[in-house]
Structures are given as structure tokens and as C-alpha cells.
Image: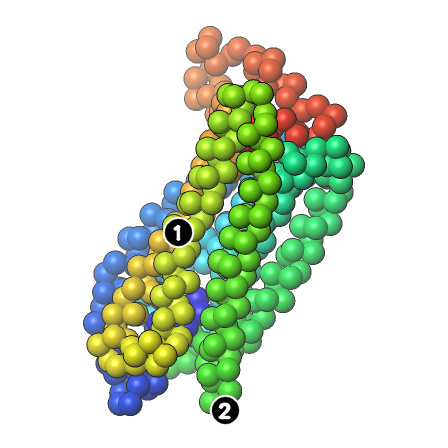
Amino acid sequence: MDYETTSPMYYDMDYSASEPCQKLDVRQIAARLLPPLYSLVFIFGFVGNMLVVLTLVNCKKLKSMTDIYLLNLTISDLLFLLTLPFWTHYATNGWVFGNSACKLFTGLYHTGYFGGIFFIILLTIDRYLAIVHAVFALKARTVTFGVVTSGVSWVVAGLVSLPGIIFTRSQKEGLRYTCSPHFPSSQYHFWKNFQTLKITILGLVLPLLVMVICYSGILKTLLRCRNEKKKHKAVRLIFAIMIVYFLFWAPYNIVLALTTFQELFGLDNCNSSNRLDQAMQVTETLGMTHCCINPIIYAFVGEKFRNYLLVFFRKHIAKRLCKYCPSFQLEAPERVNSVFTRSTGEQEISTGL
């Protein structure tokens, strides 16, 4: 949550315009729409990402660098999701959890957001190495390297999140408490512009640039692949990742830029400001739902991951629910138990996890 126009972190008044601008309509809309939307995102996202975590840990055993990145991506989504119940309560009742909790959940939100971006980038590079530079990947794509790069990514995500944590605080505004950024008045425009440019560059420009470069090389390699079935599966997954990520987060970044640089676009009036606030709520909620889609596009689209999930369901859930059902007592398919080879999952990556 970055600015007063961002979903739960809105102000009742906007003094950046030439005269005070009432934001009561925006707040009322948020109080009605955001709680059910956030609740749905939280439920579906939490269930989907927990299934990914349980499947990775219990079935795949984290035997490849891809598994490490996928697990960390899921953890970042869970961090992001765990803040949603508090923003849901905030949208209807104001912030009642105190200043420390305001900074804590803002930090979790930002760290989860940037962490997810960084692990999407790492997964993209991982696939590029596995498909385009398969020989080099045999040595480079190790579990140890995956753990080290994951640790570095979390540190960077924390550092990038620091400005949002430092400047965000809870204070009483009117009849309610808010949890929102409060930049120093002498440097207000600098920090606000800096935050917007940071989010736009790290959250949209950089990952899309990496995806275009890496997937261009991947597609050239796949077009030379003789196995049509595997080639088509990989191409579908690649385009799904690119298109879904862009569709879910590009609108938010565009609205964020328009909101921050209102004067440049001639939108620095009360009516336009209110409309941008409403657009921010809609586009950020759309972006939040991306963490529900991640388990699908990174995991459940893959045939082998579906097999793992089936094994996990039969082994840990179905047997307990139906102890006397013969169909659930069968052993796991042989091909699922032996999918890992010395190539640390190259074939798995090339066919879509």
C-alpha cells in the first residue's frame, strides 16, 4: 500500500489540489466493495499457495533450483496475502491496530510484493538457462545456488521496502485513524515520485524486459525442438506467464503513474482525483488477485505437478477421508516417483513444470 489513493490507504481529504477535495465517496465505495473482494482473494490465494507449499515439500522434496524459486515465490504470495484481512478491516473501520502493526503489515505487504517480482524474474532466468543453455545449466542450476540467490532476493526485497515502512504510520485524521505514507513536507514530491518510479521500474518494466529477452531466446530454441507436444506445452506456458502478469499488474502501474503525476496529465482537479482513486482501488485489487493465479500458471498448468498433487491428495487426504476405498489405496504412479533425473529437472522445466 503506497499512497493515499491506494485501496485501504486513502485519506479523507486531498490537499494536493488547489482546494481541499472530499474523498468521502471513495471511502464509502471502498468500505462496500473491498472487504468481499479482499476476502475472496485471501481465501482462494491462501488455499492455492498452501497446496503448492505442501506439494513441493512433501512430494517434490525441493530437489531442484526451480523448486526453491517456486517455494519462495509461494511464500512471498503468502506474506502478501496475510496482510489482506487487516486491510479488509481497515477499509470498513479505519486502522485500529496501532502504529507498530501499521508498519509491520505495510512491510509484509511490500516485501511480499517485491519478493514475488524478484522470484518471477529468477524463474524466468532459470527457464532460460535450462532450455537455451542446457549444458551450462547442469552445473549452474543447483539447489545451493538457488538457496543463495533466494536469500539475496529477500534481502533486496527488504531493502527496497524500507522507504514504505519508514514513512508509513498510523495517525488520527478526522474521526478515524489511518495507516498511510506521510512523507516529509519539504521532500514530499521527491519521495512520492521516487516511490512511484521504483514500483513501476521494479514491478513492471524490469520483469517484462527480462521476460521478453529470455522468452525470445527460449522460443527460438523451442522452434528447433523436434518434440511437437513438449514444444507446444512450453510455448503455452510461456505466453500464459507473460500475458497474465502484464494484464494483472500493468493497469495498476499506469494508474499509479497517472495519480502521482496528475499535473503533467492535466488531472489535478477534484473530479479527476476521485476517479483516479477509484481506478486505483480497482486496479490494485486486480493486481492482488495475481497471487491467486500464480499457483495455476506456475504449478497446476504443469502435467507433472498435477501428478504430484494427485499423489499428495491420495496419500494425505483421501486415505483419511475414505479409509476403505480401494481406489485410494493404490500406490503412486511409477512415473511420478521417478521424474527427477541427474539434470535437476531440465526436462520438467522445458515441459512446463
Residue type at tag 2: Ser
Q: How crowded is mark 2: few (under 14 residues within 10 Å), some or many (20 or more)?
A: few
Horizontal and vertical percent for residue 135? Answer: 75, 32
| Image spot of residue 224 (x, y percent) | 59, 27
Q: In this view, does 319 lie above or below 166?
A: above
Relative image position of residue 118 (x, y in whole percent) = 58, 53
Q: Can residue 75 be seen in this view?
A: no
At a point 54% along the width and 54% down the height, the residue shown is 209
Q: What residue type is labelled 1?
A: Phe
Q: Which of 282 and 180 is in front in this view?
A: 282
In this rendering, the answer to whether 49 lies above or below 7 is above
Residue 226 or 338: which is nearer the viewer? 226
Image: 221 above or below 165: above
Name the mark nearer the viewer: 1 or 2: 1
Badge 1 or badge 2: first in the primary sequence = 2
Residue position marked by numbered label 1 in the rendering: 248
Query: Furthest residue to the right?
Result: 139
Question: Which element is circle 1 on?
Answer: helix
Relative to 56, is 144 above or below? below
Residue extending furthest top? 326
Q: Indicate left or right for 231 with 1 as reference.
A: right
Res 257 → quadrant: bottom left
Residue drawn at x 46%, y 39% is 239
Q: Label 1: few (<14), some or many (≥20) within 10 Å?
A: many
Label ID, residue 306: none
Residue 188 drawn at (x, y percent): 47, 85
Q: Residue at x 56, y 74 (%)?
A: 163
Q: Residue 186 carries which label?
A: 2
